[in-house]
Amino acid sequence: MKLLTHNMLSSKCLKNVNVGYPLSIKVEEMITSVVDFNPEFIARIIPKLEWNALKQAVNEVGKDSCLPNNLIENFENDEDFLKKVHHVLLEIEIVNGCLVCPETGRSFPINNGIPNMLLNEDEV
Amino acid sequence: MSLDDRVARSVALENAYVHDVYEQFYDNPHSRPWPKVKTFLESLEPGSLVCDVGCGNGKYLNLNSTTFNIGGDKSSRLTAVAREKENEVIILDNLSLPFRDCSLDAVISVAVVHHLATTERRINAIRELARVLRIGGRIIISVWAMEQSHRKFESQDVLVPWRRPKNLLNTPSLEMTSATSTSEEDGYLPYNAYTQTSDTESSKSLKSRITLRKRNRRQKGINPGRHSSPSSSSLSSPNETCYSFVRRAIQRLAGGRRVSMHKPWFLESWTACHKENTSKRFDPNSLPVCECCDCTDNIQDIPIELRRIDDEMVVVGQRRKTFPSSQLINDLPTGGFKSRSLTNIKTVENNNTITAITSDEVPVGEANEDNNEDQKEVLALESKNEQIGNHLVKPKLVKQKKSICEEDAEEALDQPTDMANITKTPTLHLTNRRSSVLKQRSLNEELMSDRVQEKERVRRNIHKQVSLNDELIYQRHTFESFKDSILSVSTSKRFQLIKTGFTNKIKNSTTNIEKVTGQSLRSGFARMFQNWKSSDSPSPITPKGKSLVSDFDPADIFESKCCSANEETATQKESIERRSSKEDGSDSSKDSSLQSDTSVDSEDSFASVIFVPKSNPMSPTPMSSDPTSPKIKTSSMPTSPKIKQSSCPTSPRIKQMPLTVYPLTKQLSSPKPSTKQEFLEKPFLGERELVPIKKPPERCKPLSQKYAVVQIPEFKKTTPTCIVTSPKPCNANLNQVAKCKINLPDQKSEEEQTTRSERLKKIREMLSQSPGFGIKSNKSHFPLIRHSSVTNGKVSAEPLPKLVSLELFNPETDDKDSDSSAISSPDSIDSIVSVKSDQKKPPEESRFKFPTYKNTKQNKLLEAAAGVASSLDEAVTKVIKTSPKLSKRQVQSTDVMSIIKRSYSFETTPLISEENVENNHKGDNMYLTDFAEKLSEKLLKEIDEYQEKTKRHLDNTSLENINDPYIHRLSNELDDLSKLSAEIKKQNEYLAKFTASACPFNRCAICKKYDCKCSLNRKSRTKVENCSRKEKEMLPDEKNKNCTEIAKSDNSKVTITNESLEKDRYTPERSANSDSENVLKFSCKNFVRLGNSTDSCDSEKG
């Protein structure tokens, strides 16, 4: 699971959960792969991100120093920044671990890079 | 059972028949992404966050590398497969998507929703999909269709045996899928419409594997609000399909959100999408679309109906029961964010409606070019859409659109904010549609009515035709026989005959297609009517009709006489071919300008067709008129295009009729002695020719004298030109003329065929002798024609017996009759347009008779006049030989009002008398005279048309302008001819289809055909009809003024076709005419095609 995906995930569907975001990440196994850098793509993705959630995820993954605390201006033209974001979003993958609902503590396992977000009938 | 139990059961069902199945599902490596989905994905802008809910093996996850694709599926096995392909996948449940709200730019749900067991769960699934979709995001939802090309489901919800991969286990697994049928049992209009969509569409859809996809929630959402009105019941309806359910669910979602009136949420993405080709299609077609997707799994085994299971399982029944509309409604509002999106949806729907319309029309309609503005827009949309997706999708969309359109339009009207949002959407289609919300609404209504009630329309058309026929025939006794003939006669055969004849003519006269076609059409129509009459009326009329038919070719005439009714068709064909050849020759002599005139004549011929029946009885000759042709005529009468086709063989008769009638009209309009003389001369000429054959040449001599006299006063030129002009004004009186034509043309056709060569020679001689002949004829023709028409009316007294029926039609018809008589040339399409103008023209001609015009137009007119003159000369000679009747016609009075009455009285009475007297020679003589008259009328009509055009220009504008419009006309006509040929082919195809359908009544078949065309050009038709109605209404009130106005309107139409140069001139009636003009402009081409219908409508109205 890439952190970009994580940035979209929520446990809102859980019963009695209002936001369910961001999910905290517990990493058991993580890999870093190389993905072609596409600055335009990253520039388009950034506005869609919840920066704080990304920042939190990065911290949880252990790459906290990679990103500034706040989204910089004119990031479209800051290739270094874009590369950092690219690395964080697309090149870091959690292979095993789990995602934890911030409100209920419900844990969603991640196996082989696939988070299992299924809920039990009684959890909906 | 409790809700919990139901849910538990549904979950158990899904687990047993869906999830477990997919856990062992063989990953079909051959499954290809559905093209629609692929197009959808490719249309997304770079950087979009896309989630494929139900990604399966992830075949859609790597289609667009510029977007971030997340695959989600409930099957851990499939997600693992997708993961192996280096895709980002999540195990998720569609009912509880693990995404934050409005986080995704696009969502695709391919063949997922139908796996859910209950409508409630399906709705929840869609709601979830909408929840995670950002405002302005795009979604594509597809579900299985009940109707698929490779298999048919007995019911909506079935358990489909899963085709086991050969490699895999033998254990059969069942995948629960709910197949939705496009045709809902609920009687939902949109669905019905869909089913009713053109055969081509439906067939395509059926052929291709159909999966219903709902694209763009927006669109879906738009419809739902109002569609869902039946909400609870509809949802719970046992027959409800997954497809319908999904659609309704989306609608409700949209509707609930709509209530909130938030800003559109899809705007951004929407705009982006619209920019892309694919996006356009999706947006407009957002509603469920059936695509020919490759259903990855072709299940060959027999599906298991869930209903049966339901009894036991109770699942299905429960879910429906459990799903109260109120709950849905309540639930929907929850998604407050998306209310904005709903507004967008509305806009989208508008677009969709448009596209749907276009799609429907296009397949049905033959020529897209002919379509009205709206249609054009639609076409543009369609073209775009076509590029994007398959046709299959369109039909469904259309259905939805239909249903939706009305609602949408209303909504749009009600909610200006929505409209603004819509306009904001960058897609051109949307903006256009929105701008013309009212138009759309009207269009939608029309479409709805048309599609849903196509049968009704057909019936209406039939009724209209009947009414027209009644009106036309009513006065004459032939009406009943006519009906009987129509009903009794096998339309299919007649149509085929007409088609063959039409095609033959077209082929024969490739160069002079316009003229030939027009003439052929006219002749065909006339023959058709004659045949009808003959066949219908066992009385001697039938033989006359035959003779009339064969008029053009004397040999044919004889044959027809000898031949039985059965053989008539063949004779007609032969005659048609001969005519085409002869006509071609004459055409070559004639100028292109003449062609336009001929086209006008053709319209007259249509009217004449109606009249023919009477003429047939009138004509003593027991020629076995073509039974087939009459049938065709009858059919053609309701539907213009068919009529046109059929008209070819009948035109000669028509021509004859118009000659006799048109003199009357001329007299009515402007009874000038000179013109009368000319006309007399012309008809006499024809009669003379004919006379040697059967009738006395008395008229011929007077005609020549008169002819010379007439020419001298105005132009001093040879008579032939005058004759030509005179018949044209006659054309103006379409109804009467047409009637006359029907009778006359037949005779003329025979005579003409025989005497054409001679006539051509004579005309050439005349032309050579009188250099100014052509010019004079053009200019002076109008006045001459008018006068001549009057004289002809007198002369026609003898032929009147045939014409009598024509006279009965209307006071206006008298003018028309004169026109018809003049209109020997049967240009089908052009003629139709011109015919209308002619009808109106006659009064104008009387007004416009000024010779001054000729001077300016002479150059151009000269050529046309020369051609016309040649044709006229021939016709005149023939007429003179054959038509002593023409002299009788001359007796008719000149006053317009009196003319109408007189024309009726005179025509009827003299015709009868003539018939009685001529009984011995009537058959041949009448036919000969009729032929001559028809020929002369055609020539006159052509000339008149030219003259009218020129006159109009002259009157309204300087003489110089005239030339240009004429040229334009010619070019336009040529285009029209080419279009006509294409249309004819299409029509033939349609006819074949119709014949296959083999409606009991010929009319029905025709109507259907006609409807098809109509559906395409419905707007144009409606407009034209309205215009014609206005015109008609105007006429009866004050014939003189109205006639002039009408003539103006007709002229305006003609001018419009040419380029509407003289619009400003016709200010007096502009208000009324403006509409007609506009319509004409847009539907000029269509109009030609629809000419028959419009004519019929006009006649009905009149």
Image: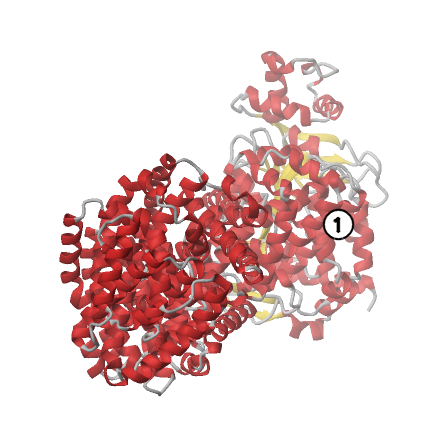
Q: Which sits in the foreground, B822 or B541?
A: B822
Q: Which residue corresponds to mark 1? A: B255
Q: Secondary structure at mark 1?
A: helix
Place of residue B947 in the rendered image (x, y in percent of width and height, measured from the top left):
35, 48
What is the x, y in percent for residue B846? 42, 53
Relative side of B592 to A23, left or right: left
Amino acid type, mark 1: Gly
Against B678, residue B889 (above or below) is: below
- Where residue B576 sits: x, y (%)? 24, 67
Q: Is residue B1053 left or right of residue B496?
A: right
State whether residue B674 appears in this view.
yes
Going 56% across and 31% down the picture, which residue do you hit? B45
Q: Quadrant of residue A43?
A: top right
Q: Is residue B791 left or right of residue B220?
A: left
Q: Is residue B102 above or below residue B925?
A: above
Residue lying furthest bottom? B538
Taking the spot 61% from the left edge, 56% from the top edge, the residue there is: B402
**The N terminus of chain B - image quarter:** bottom right
Instruction: Say which chain tag 1 marks.
Output: B
